[in-house]
Amino acid sequence: MFLLRYLAVGIIGTLAVHYGAPRFKPLLAPSNPAPDGTSVAATSPATRPFEPVQERGGVRVVAPDPITEPDQPPSAAYEPSSEAAVAAPPPAVATPAADKAAPVVVTTLGYTPSTSRIPASGSDTTHWGVTLQEAALFERDGKRSGITLPGGVLVEQTGAGTSSRGEVALCRVWRQGAWAGPWLIATADLIRFEGGRGEVDADELDLLLRYGALHARQEARRRELVRQTVDANPHAAPLRQLKQQYDAAAERAKGLTRQRDGAQGTQRMKLGDELRRLKEDEMRMRRQIEALTRQYEAWKQAHPVATADPARDPQVRELAAQIESLRRQLGHFGL
């Protein structure tokens, strides 16, 4: 009995749904339509658009929903996200500076400045030069310093003046790897050039220093040949020695005169007495020099001696050849 009742209820329910559902469909329409006349189902973003019902053998079949990404709004397919819009870089704009870098100009000297090897002695240089022969150095007051430079020494001039021996230049001297001085040097002992050495080639300066050294050796050899002729006279050596003493006394007298003029009282009197004694010695040596000079000339006339010819001396000729070779390399120095 129970089984018969169960089957009857199932059959009746199935028939009621099949035949009764279409009649109740109008009653299930929404009572409050949307303002724009479309159904809520058609405008809700969570549902698909309305699709027609297909009839298959008397059974209504609804097409299945398309597979979509969960929680993805319809506009996601064509609207870029705000983060992507922010992260995207702006389009690059070409500029002349970016397209073509400015050229870099590099100036290269064709020589090594002499000041890179031997620095300038100062910013007050008016001339620079090289000693061409042995050159005595004097203090600013004219007193001998006791220093004699060989040939081929670099000097830089800062001033000029005159003395009893002619024109002098106030120079700093490059000695033993450093600048020293200044001292007064006779310009006759120098070859000088205006300005500084900033544009002088270092290698050419080396050649010029060699030129000065060779020139000094040549001049020394010439003087030696002359002295050999002079020293044949027996009165030559005493006369030379006496003249050196006289010159030293004259320099001493100049210094005492300046000291006396600046002194006062007993000190002035003391310096005056010393100066008078020195002047007396000076006069005595002058008379001796005059006497020895007469003896020297008398012997020279009585004993003629052939003077050595430097042009025939082998040493002078060898030095002259080396000097000429350097002169050709230093033509623009006006040697």
Image (tube, rainbow, N blue to C red):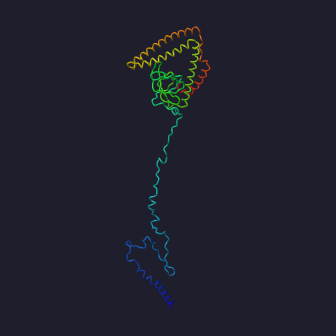
Among all residues in the image, which is located at the extreme bottom? 1
Among all residues in the image, which is located at the extreme right? 314
> Is 52 or 90 nearer to us in this picture?
90
**Which percent across, then down, holds residue 211?**
56, 25
Question: Is the residue 291 above or below the residue 327 in the image?
Answer: above
The quadrant of the image that shows the C terminus is top right
317 displayed left or right of 77: right
**Which percent across, then down, holds residue 320?**
59, 22
**Which percent across, then down, holds residue 315?**
61, 21
**Residue 272 placement: quadrant:** top left
**Residue drawn at point x = 58 percent, y = 14 percent:** 231
**Tally of numbered tags:** 0
Among all residues in the image, which is located at the extreme front? 266
Question: Is the residue 155 above or below the residue 24 in the image?
Answer: above
299 displayed left or right of 72: right
**Which percent across, then down, holds residue 198?**
49, 32
156 displayed left or right of 265: right
**Residue 269 placement: quadrant:** top left
> Is 272 or 224 nearer to us in this picture?
272
Question: Is the residue 34 above or below the residue 331 in the image?
Answer: below
162 displayed left or right of 307: left
